[in-house]
Each structure stands twice: as C-alpha cells, then as structure tokens.
C-alpha cells in the first residue's frame, strides 16, 4: 500500500480500488462468474431435456422420432454438464 501511495494515489477510495485490483480478487470474481454464474442455466436445461425426452417416450406422437432426434444429440454432449459437477 505504501508503494501505491507513493505512485500518486491520493485518496482512500482510489487506494482501496488499487489494492483490490492488485490482490487478484477482481480477476477471481470474473473467473467465478464465467465458470458458474454464466452457466447456471445448464443444469436446468439438462433436466428439462431429460423430462421432455421421458414425456415424449411415454406419450408418443407422430413427431416423436424427430423430437428424440433433436433431443438426443444435446443430451449426448455431456461435457458441459460434467464440468459443472
């Protein structure tokens, strides 16, 4: 903090901001946001796809094969879902 003060930071707000930036907490918050907050809808989407697949299988209609053909590749891409575990 002394080095920051010597570099010309003149008030407590600017000092606090500079120390926060240098601490790495800002970067850590960004990483946490990227890894978790921005992907929080993935588990919900996975659950919705599983539920839709089960429903369509239990109550088949003419378009069931096409619906399953659209759902199955999305469920097969488990990499994104596994990353969240």
Image (cartoon, rainbow, N blue to C red):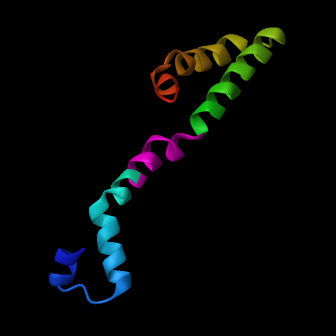
- Front position in the image: 52 or 78: 78
Q: Is residue 35 left or right of residue 42?
A: left
Q: Name which quarter of the figure residue 61 lies in.
A: top right
Asked whether 39 falls inside the magenta stretch, the response is yes
Taking the spot 18% from the left edge, 86% from the top edge, the residue there is 8
Taking the spot 67% from the left edge, 18% from the top edge, the residue there is 67
- Front position in the image: 39 or 54: 39
Q: Is residue 78 left or right of residue 6?
A: right
Q: Is residue 8 shown above or below 39?
A: below
Q: Is residue 80 shown above or below 27?
A: above
Residue 73 image position (x, y, % from top left): 53, 17
Q: Is residue 67 left or right of residue 57?
A: left
Q: Is residue 30 shown above or below 80?
A: below
Taking the spot 57% from the left edge, 34% from the top edge, the residue there is 42
Residue 63 image position (x, y, % from top left): 72, 16
Residue placed farthest to the bottom in the image?
10
């Amino acid at each position: 903090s002394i080095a920051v003060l010597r570099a010309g930071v003149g008030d407590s707000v600017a000092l606090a901001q500079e120390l926060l930036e240098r601490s790495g907490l800002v970067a850590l918050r960004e990483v946490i946001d990227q890894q978790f907050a921005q992907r929080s809808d993935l588990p919900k989407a996975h659950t919705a796809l599983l539920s839709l697949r089960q429903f369509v299988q239990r109550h088949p209609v003419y378009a069931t094969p096409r619906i399953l053909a659209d759902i199955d590749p999305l469920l097969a891409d488990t990499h994104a879902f596994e990353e969240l575990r």
